[in-house]
Amino acid sequence: AQSVTQLDSHVSVSEGTPVLLRCNYSSSYSPSLFWYVQHPNKGLQLLLKYTSAATLVKGINGFEAEFKKSETSFHLTKPSAHMSDAAEYFCVVSAGGGSYIPTFGRGTSLIVHP
Amino acid sequence: GAVVSQHPSRVICKSGTSVKIECRSLDFQATTMFWYRQFPKKSLMLMATSNEGSKATYEQGVEKDKFLINHASLTLSTLTVTSAHPEDSSFYICSAEGQGTYEQYFGPGTRLTVT
């Protein structure tokens, strides 16, 4: 069994300040973890992924995430928010054990103020 | 990179009619594709897992006779919404699984409006 919890439904930051979007997961197997971004009325774009290699993962647009097994977390960060980062972000877990069906978090809406 | 397309991007249909949505992996073969439904300001809800050459596996609560899925080739899966009702109006998204990567490549989505 697997699950993913995005702790915040909304995160509001000012342009130029750091971004932190939190994600915790549970999995019976070694998971693969992903962060996707969705702009309004658009499909999903992969930001970054963790698949058992380096625990600090760098993605596109300056985002990165750190896999912490002891904390079962995979939080998404960015040092400095841009207005264009305003979107919906989804944390996704896909575990092994013969089933790689992805499980989505509920999403976190990132709001960026000028 | 891996690209997944969906057609159409938007469709409006009358209540009682059927609508087919196509999902194609353009530059890779996908033995497994997934169909999701997304309500406004909500997360993606997995509807079914589509396996090439076999019957789709539906999630609990999803009517298999209403949402017909066909995965006839390694690059194409189709979702047909039969006898559509206004409550079927939603954003439908497909994804294709990269072989051996467990990564999902998502299509751009199809906005279905049933009047």
Image (cartoon, rainbow, N blue to C red):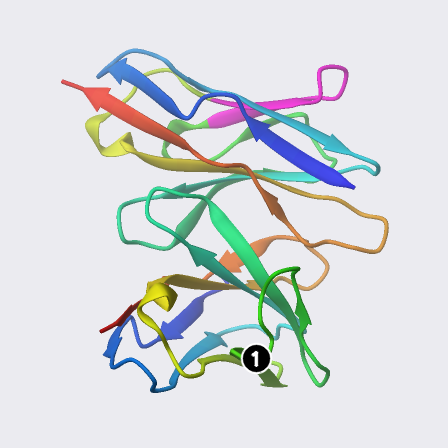
Q: Is residue A90 magenta?
A: no
Q: Is residue A60 visible?
A: no
Q: Please, what is the dominant secondary structure of the magenta stretch?
A: strand
Horizontal side, residue B49 vs residue A91: left or right: right
Which quarter of the picture shows residue B4?
A: bottom left
With respect to residue B44, does B66 lie above or below? below
Where on the picture, by quarter, is residue B51? bottom right
Quadrant of image for the C terminus of chain A: top left
Question: Which chain letter matches label 1?
Answer: B
Q: Residues within 10 Å of mark 1 (few under 14, many from 20)?
A: many
As drawn, B67 above or below A2 = below
- Which residue lies at the image location 38% right of the left edge and 51% below the top edge? B39
- Is A74 above or below relative to A88? above
Residue B50 lies, in percent from the top left, at 64, 73
Under mark 1, the amino acid is Ile
The percent coordinates of residue B37 (x first, y second) are 46, 59
From the top left corner, tell me how far across and down residue B48 is, in percent.
61, 66
Q: Residue at x 57, y 72 (%)?
A: B28
Q: Using residue B61 as the reference point, say whether residue B36 is left or right of it.
A: left
Q: Which residues are magenta?
A: A64-76
Quadrant position of the N terminus of chain A in the picture: top right
- The secondary structure type at the circle numbered 1 is strand
Q: Residue at x 31, y 77 (%)?
A: B8
User: Looking at the image, how many numbered discs can be counted on the residues?
Assistant: 1
Q: Nearer the viewer, residue B67 or B21?
A: B67
- Residue where numbered disc 1 is placed: B69
Q: Is residue B87 above or below residue A90?
A: below
